[in-house]
């Protein structure tokens, strides 16, 4: 079984994969939109062929069941596709499809110990995060889209002590030509495009990693927006 795998839960069009493939020997990308899965398989066919990239087309839920689940694909903006049923006033903007559903923990059990887990699932992040922890899985690094403080409280309760935030709107500017060390220790670079999640761990160099007391204070003054919350079990020093 592979060790220290990166899991991209909510892979979308795969814009973060070139970075992840340099940071781990295996990457597992999970995406519910079948068209995006086909696009990513073609885009990274070399990594798929080599077995370094696994692409799973399924809906992530917190229920271990063989039944299919309904997923809602936004007809104009694929980044807004979601598992929770949209409100009646927005439902006509989505196409409903039926897909196999899986839990994040079952995928991790199949493919190996997680080094980093990215969760970006449009209104369902906290449930998948809880499901991972309920299976007693604690990745070294986690990032979760933060719509409120619920995910922060969950991470604190599970023993995470070091935190950072990445502002999605500014990722292409702040992390253009980011230089970092790959999984082999070699130096390389990547420029993150718009709608990508950006780096993790010590590669987050534009903002400092904070302890719980500092992050409590920081979040009280944080303006709402497109924010990913990063957490680590250990203190992180940026390179």
Image: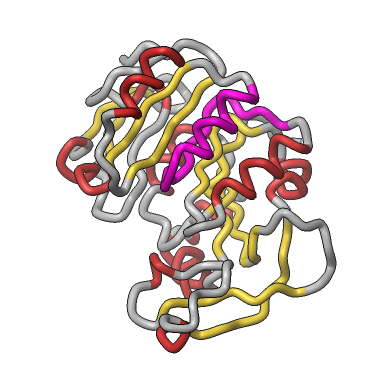
Q: In the picture shown, does residue 187 fall above or below 30?
A: above
Task: Give the residue drawn at x 48%, y 56%.
Answer: 11
Residue placed farthest to the left in the image? 173
Viewer-proximal residue, 90 or 35?
90
Along the viewing direction, whichever of 13 and 90 lies nearer the viewer? 90
Q: Is residue 151 magenta?
A: yes
Residue 4: name its quadrant.
top right
Residue at image location 43% in from the left, 43% down from the top: 148
Image coords of residue 39 (percent x, y) = 44, 70
Q: Colour mode?
A: secondary structure
Left or right: where does residue 151 sit relative to residue 5? left
Q: Residue at x 34, y 73 (%)?
A: 77
The image position of residue 113, as x and y in percent, is: 69, 32
Image quarter in which the N terminus is found: top right
The one of 124 and 25 positioned closer to us in this rendering = 124
Q: Toward the viewer: 66 or 199?
A: 66
At 42% across and 81% down in the image, what residue appears? 90
Which residues lie in the magenta part? 137-158
Give the side of residue 112 with respect to residue 153, left or right.
right
- Residue 26, position in %: x, y? 58, 40
Question: Magenta stretch: residue 157 in it?
Answer: yes
Q: Residue furthest bottom?
A: 92
Q: Quadrant of the C terminus?
A: top left
Q: Position of residue 175 (x, y in %)?
A: 22, 37
């Amino acid at each position: 079984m592979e060790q220290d795998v990166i899991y991209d839960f909510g892979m979308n069009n795969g814009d973060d994969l070139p970075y992840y493939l340099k940071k781990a020997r295996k990457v597992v990308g999970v995406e519910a939109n079948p068209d995006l899965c086909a696009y990513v398989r073609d885009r990274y066919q070399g990594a798929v062929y080599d077995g370094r990239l696994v692409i799973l087309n399924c809906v992530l839920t917190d229920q271990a069941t063989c039944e299919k689940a309904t997923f809602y694909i936004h007809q104009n903006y694929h980044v807004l596709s979601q598992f929770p049923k949209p409100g009646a006033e927005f439902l006509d903007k989505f196409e409903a499809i039926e897909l196999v559903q899986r839990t994040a923990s079952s995928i991790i059990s199949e493919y190996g110990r997680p080094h980093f887990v990215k969760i970006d699932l449009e209104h369902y992040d906290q449930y998948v995060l809880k499901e991972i922890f309920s299976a007693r899985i604690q990745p070294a690094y986690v990032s979760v889209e933060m719509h409120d403080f619920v995910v922060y409280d969950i991470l604190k309760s599970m023993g995470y002590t070091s935190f950072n935030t990445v502002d999605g709107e500014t990722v292409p500017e702040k992390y253009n030509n980011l230089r970092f060390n790959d999984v082999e220790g070699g130096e390389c670079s990547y420029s993150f495009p718009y709608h990508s999640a950006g780096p993790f761990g010590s590669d987050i160099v534009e903002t400092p990693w904070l302890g719980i007391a500092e992050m409590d204070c920081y979040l009280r003054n944080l303006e709402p927006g497109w924010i990913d919350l990063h957490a680590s079990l250990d203190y992180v020093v940026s390179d």
